Amino acid sequence: MEFLDLPPMLGAAGSVRLPGSKSISNRVLLLAALAEGETDIRDLLMSDDVERMLEALRALGVEWRREGDSLNYRVRGVGGPFPVKHGDLFLGNAGTAFRPLTAALALSGGEYRLSGVPRMHERPIGDLVDALRQLGADIRCTANEGYPPLHLKPATIRPGGVVRVRGDVSSQFLTALLMALPLTGVETTIEVVGELISKPYIRITLELMARFGVQVQQQGWERFVVPGGARYHSPGTVFVEGDASSASYFLAAGAIGGGPVRVEGVGRSSIQGDVRFAEALEQLGARITMGDNWIEAAAPASGVLKAFDLDLNHIPDAAMTLAVAALFADGPCRLRNIASWRVKETDRIAAMATELRKVGAEVEEGADYLVVKRPAALRPAAIDTYDDHRMAMCFSLVGLGGCRVRINDPKCVNKTFPGYFDAFARVARPVPVVAIDGPSASGKGTVAARVAEALGWHYLDSGSLYRLSALAALRAGVALDDEAGVAALAAALPARFEGGRVLLDGDDVTDDIRSEACSAGASRVAVLAAVRAALFDRQRDYRVAPGLVAEGRDMGSVIFPDAGIKVFLTASAAARAERRYKQLMEKGLPANMESLLKDLQERDARDAARPVAPLTKLPDAALLDTTERNVDEAVAFVLELVEAGRKSSG
Ligand code: DC
């Protein structure tokens, strides 16, 4: 399975332009299709769900075209029911396409089949089907009653009167009915049975219908009268607001990670209910500022979000973001009245509970609520996303706890926000890494340790882990080519680094691991893939605020490919041999220049030729040749790179 590894973060700040709202995009497309006249739609969302709607409309005889590769579309409305009377539509997992099209097609007098992905076939639609049947529609659920796929047949529609629809499972059933009823031309009253959930989404529907010329009379949240003779007319141009649900991840990032983080595209004048997510964040102590078309969030003055107990029925989608924000609150948090989560892209209550537990949270799961208690420290985990875009986006916030996180199947964000992870990377500030590699005896260890000290960052001498693995194998009598045996030792290496000393199982082995036997052993175990894999996470755990200087072969290529600074530190073989010679002499050890040089040259050749993690300068690494430089100059060179990087990232 594909995955995306997100690094631990120091914080978040910056600004993001939001993609268009999914709810508005798919409603406007349908209204423009049914309307008289042409509609120019600006800033339409480009995502899977909108694609499904566009494809369906084309199949139903609606002409539309995209202007170049802009986000602007022109739709030629058909001015009434769809002209194409036969169709077989595949609508993926797009509820915002499936429900409204079901209603519009049921009243279009044709024969249609509607289906989606397997999960779509588990999502209820019975309440809408029941309502449409009251109007005379002939709708069959071809697999299970109350669920897609659907087979719609031509039928005599008996418009007018009162249609009753349940409102307590999904507000999309009411939305679908409201948008379709003007096709009948006869005044119809909708009565909502049960407590209507997700009311702000109905507001979006009514607001957009009004823009297309149909004013629905609203009597509380129980009765809606669609007037007789109502017809949709194109308003000319419609601007799609930024997606307020998508805004929630960035606002939460600002509230958790210091901020300020600004989202552009939604604000005070938004018609989307999910802008009220900002109010919820405010109740957690976040500092929120708002303009007509932007919202900004920063961390509470105290630095920590307050625990909460909130009814979130009005913002079901954005509320998921609060479940993850609860990992950063100062006490247990309760999310109430969220039963609709169970019939969304996945059972979101169950999915959220399972994945929050993976990072260490204590979670209580109820039929319509969640209680989330943060752990003392977050644990790195691989998060499953259940083909649910919001699961993937929510869990990207875990990195703000200084904890790396793996997002499985990250492309599920394409449903509503294909560029999500790039946008997130623009505001997230990862814990910085300087990766230093180079040939044997190039002085990379000395330089790396000095740079770490100068910056006050952590230091990883990755070679010592391979040396320790070799030593552990030698001590345990495990053959150095016993891949599984050495890997098992490497995975559980009882090693500690303390004040420049290296301890194995409590023994000081600082000098032992530098012995010729360990050096030779290290280079043998380092070519074993299972050993490298066993040390993978251990090395990544060194990435801790405020930063890390990591030295060794694959630091910049495999362990920290996203390192902001990569350095390839080298020197001529002659210069390196001479340095080694001096070191040995100083220690009073026997040394021979010629054989040292020959050794180094042979080792370089072996290192460059080995199939696993060969010695090579990465294209994005800065070359630092120290043949003519001393250690101080080399350290200064790297520190300048760090400084320049800081300046360019603001
Ligand atoms: O840097 P060093 O000499 O301490 O490394 C010891 C051995 O481990 C050497 O053969 C290179 C290898 N090594 C590696 O393969 N990958 C690393 N990240 C670090 C060292």
Image (cartoon, rainbow, N blue to C red):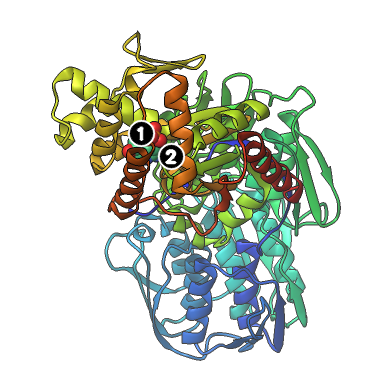
Q: Which numbered circle lies on residue 592?
A: 1
Residue 533, above or below 68: above
Residue 496: in sight, yes or no? yes
Q: What residue is rendered at 51% in x and 59% in y?
A: 619
Residue 295 lies left or right of residue 249; in this view the side is: right
How busy is the neighbourhood of tag 1: few (under 14 within 10 Å), some, or many (20 plus)? few
Q: What residue is rendered at 61% in x and 50% in y?
A: 425
Q: Mark 1 falls on what kind of element?
A: loop
Task: Identify which residue, 206 or 533, lies in the foreground.
Answer: 533
Q: What residue is rendered at 69% in x and 59% in y?
A: 18
Q: What residue type is labelled 2?
A: Ala
Residue 65 lies left or right of residue 542; in this view the side is: right
Coordinates of residue 104 in the picture (x, y in percent): 53, 75
How busy is the neighbourhood of tag 2: few (under 14 within 10 Å), some, or many (20 plus)? many
Q: Mark 2 falls on what kind of element?
A: helix
Task: Identify which residue, 15 or 102, lies in the foreground.
Answer: 15
Residue 603 lies left or right of residue 562; in this view the side is: left
Q: In which quarter of the image is residue 523?
A: top left
Coordinates of residue 7 in the picture (x, y in percent): 52, 41
Q: What residue is rendered at 13% in x and 29% in y?
A: 479
Residue 380: in sight, yes or no? no
Q: Mark 2 points at which residue?
A: 577
Residue 121, above or below 407: below
Q: In which quarter of the image is residue 184?
A: bottom right
Task: Identify which residue, 49 or 379, lies in the foreground.
Answer: 379
Coordinates of residue 370 in the picture (x, y in percent): 50, 30
Q: Does the residue labelled 1 lie within 8 Å of ligand 1?
A: no
Coordinates of residue 266 in the picture (x, y in percent): 76, 56
Q: How far apart are marks 1 and 2 (CA)?
A: 9 Å
